[in-house]
Image (cartoon, rainbow, N blue to C red):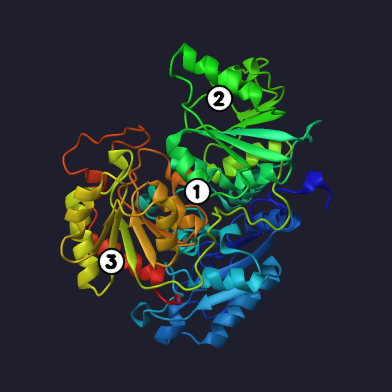
Amino acid sequence: MAKQEIIHGHRGLFDAVLFDRDNTLIREVPRIDDPDLVVPMPGVRDALDLLRGAGLRVGVVCDQPAVGFGYTTRAQAEAVNERIERLLGPFDTWQMCCHTPADGCGCRKPAPGLITAAARDLGVPAHRCVMIGDIGPDLQAAAAAGATGLLVPTGQTCVAEIASAPYRAPSLTGAAEWILDRRHAARPGPVPGVTGNILAVCPDSASDVLLAGPALRALAANARSVSLLTGAHGAGVARLLPGVTRLLEWRMPGGGRSAVDSLVDAVQCWQLDEAVVFTAEGQSPLPTALLLRRAGIGRISAISDEQPGDLLDVAHRVPDDLPDPLRALSLAAAAGHPLPAGDDARLRTTLGTAGERGRRVVVHPGAGAPARGLPRKWAVEAVRTLVHAGHEVVVTGAPGDEELTAEVAGDLAGDLGGRTDLAGLARLLAGSACLVTGNTAPAHLAAAVGTPVVSVFAPTVPYARRGPYATPHVRLGDPHAPCRGTGIVVCELPGHPCLGEVDTAAVLAAVDLLTRGRPA
């Protein structure tokens, strides 16, 4: 494959698109058992033609409880499926659950079983699949499998499901176009004339450095060396990432004129050929680019919607709802440094993943920004609920969180507050069944070692960008709270209602959903 065709080591961000059947591919007919009653939904053939024409594989994942209840037979359901194929063309996989809700299976949506089975049948990772459906359980199943859920509402879709969907499209054709737009978001740019020593600049945040990890691997695959410039918070996790040749821990701009001048002097000594500047949401790359120009770096790339003048050689634009790891990968590709073939674009650490996952549930209540952590009283009740249901629970926290973790753990759970560094926490998570936490770096660390996450997520930042990436997860919390999109650090409302009003029974249900049927 020519280099200009490589996108994240594949032909795009996604490899496969999975469809719900009733009210997505065909009009719903209750307990349908007659192939002659099959009527395709508007635009479905055009959408399928677009996706197949782009080389994406397509499949169907559907619940058919009418079989389990005895209203129809499996043979009748399969005859309906055959009629759909005659009308809409062949699908690369069919996955059908015939259980009733009372069966408690691991395949009926919102359980992830159908999607993981479809991905396995297609030979692609679940996180490179898009699930298109018309109701909440379709999207919940996608999340629980680590895939991307895309809602196409119909008259039967609840208003709350529409409002809660991280991604939605107005029609099936619109859904196909949405997928293709994002699939090509990381198309490689021109290869720079000099590909030598690259400086990557990241915000001073453990989360931001973790989320840039796949992009750092992309830079490393195309350079002699990658130096990472970040602050003390980002440096701790940067030491766990593959691809970083040299870590440059520095106080970011804002420390006064002498600090800026010393930073420029230091960069001049590092013999760097180009720089790629990764920024947090709402942060302009231009002040950093100005410093790098002063330091003599001749080629600078960043994501920017501003008029950069001569400060940026590559001023890249991406869709606002692209997850932050893919935004960073998109920038690396635009700078001429795509991921090599074979890299699956997941978050990753140098520690690898555990071969055996235990039954332990980790609860991490704290966060650097208090508004994104778990409310204290709520976390105490959540731990109690999990322990009383038979789960082994361990509470973790950063140094300084010892009083918080002691209260949350009580006499029921293990307390590791302040006792694990980032490497130790990564190893703990890799051997655990699940993590319960807010919008914190441990959520992304869990994703990097492949551990499912119950994400009790305050909507102060966009979930589509900052939620757990490419790992099985369940989202809890009010996505429409007044703090939505404000970026606040401290919640001023009593009880932190966007999180504190979540029924702790929902945490137990989420843990059970993510761990059901998974090997211990």
For label 3, the crowd category at 10 Å Cα-Cα, with few meaning under 14, some 14 to 19 and many 20 or more, is: many
Amino acid type of disc 1?
Arg
Q: Which residue is mark 1?
A: 168
> In this view of the protein, which residue sits in the foreground, 43 or 520?
520
Residue 253 percent across, percent down from the top left: 48, 21
Amino acid at the residue labelled 2: Pro
The mark found on residue 79 in the picture is none
Q: Is residue 481 left or right of residue 218?
A: left
Q: Which residue is mark 3?
A: 393
| Residues at discs 3 and 2 in contact (Cβ within 8 Å) | no
- Tell me the mark number nearer the camera, choosing from 1 and 2: 2
Q: Is residue 40 visible?
A: yes
Amino acid tagged 3: Val
Q: Nearer the viewer, residue 285 or 164?
A: 285
Q: Earlier in the sequence, mark 3 or mark 2?
A: 2
Decide if residue 197 is on the left or right side of residue 443.
right
Image vertical order of residue 160 relative to residue 57, above or below:
above
Q: Which residue is found at the position 48% from the left and 56% from the top?
A: 447
The residue wearing badge 2 is: 285
Callout 1 secondary element: loop
> Is tag 3's residue or tag 1's residue first in the polypeptide sequence?
1
User: Of 222 and 340, which appears nearest the observer?
Assistant: 222
> In the rendering, at what x and y percent does residue 354 appear?
49, 68
Residue 9 locus on image (x, y percent): 71, 53
Dot 1 and dot 2 residues touching (CB under 8 Å): no
Disc 3 to disc 1, C-alpha distance: 36 Å
